[in-house]
Amino acid sequence: MNAPGPASRPRIAPGFRLQWEEVQQAHVLLYPEGMVKLNQSAGEILKRCDGREVSALVDELQQAFATTGLEPEVLAFLDIAVQQRWVELA
């Protein structure tokens, strides 16, 4: 299993669906056996996992939240997401 890098193109893996859950006021990742409630950062990252390069995803997050230096944290989260099989890399 490859670790994600700036040129990786993550997308939500088949069998999982990301959606906003109004009752929980959080993004959730649904799959046949259950649900994962995501914190705000995880939700913001995963909703951008649509096949764009990680570098573009990071740029958008940094612009949206008026900050810099997010790439290490985004890559660390994506590494976990790949291990959990929530995300596939292209």
Image: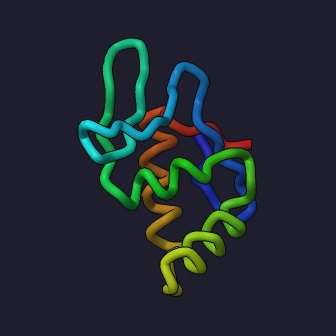
Give the percent coordinates (x, y) of residue 76.
45, 61
Q: Residue furthest top?
A: 32
Q: Residue furthest front?
A: 22
Q: Is residue 35 above or below residue 65?
A: above
Q: Going by the image, does 74 lie left or right of 56?
A: left
| Colour treatment of the image | rainbow
Q: Going by the image, does 36 lie left or right of 79?
A: left
Q: Going by the image, does 59 lie left or right of 83?
A: right
What residue do we see at 34% from left, 14% from top?
A: 33
Q: Nearer the viewer, residue 79 or 23?
A: 23
What residue do we see at 48% from left, 57% from top?
A: 44
Q: In the picture, residue 64 is in which quadrant? A: bottom right
Q: Is residue 57 above or below residue 30?
A: below
What residue do we see at 41% from left, 26% from top?
A: 30
What residue do we see at 42% from left, 48% from top?
A: 80
Give the percent coordinates (x, y) of residue 53.
73, 59
Give the percent coordinates (x, y) of residue 75.
52, 62
For the C terminus, give its image quadrant: top right
Tell me how many marks there are. Answer: 0
Q: In the picture, residue 8 is in which quadrant? A: bottom right
Q: In the picture, residue 20 is in which quadrant? A: top left
For the N terminus, give its image quadrant: top right
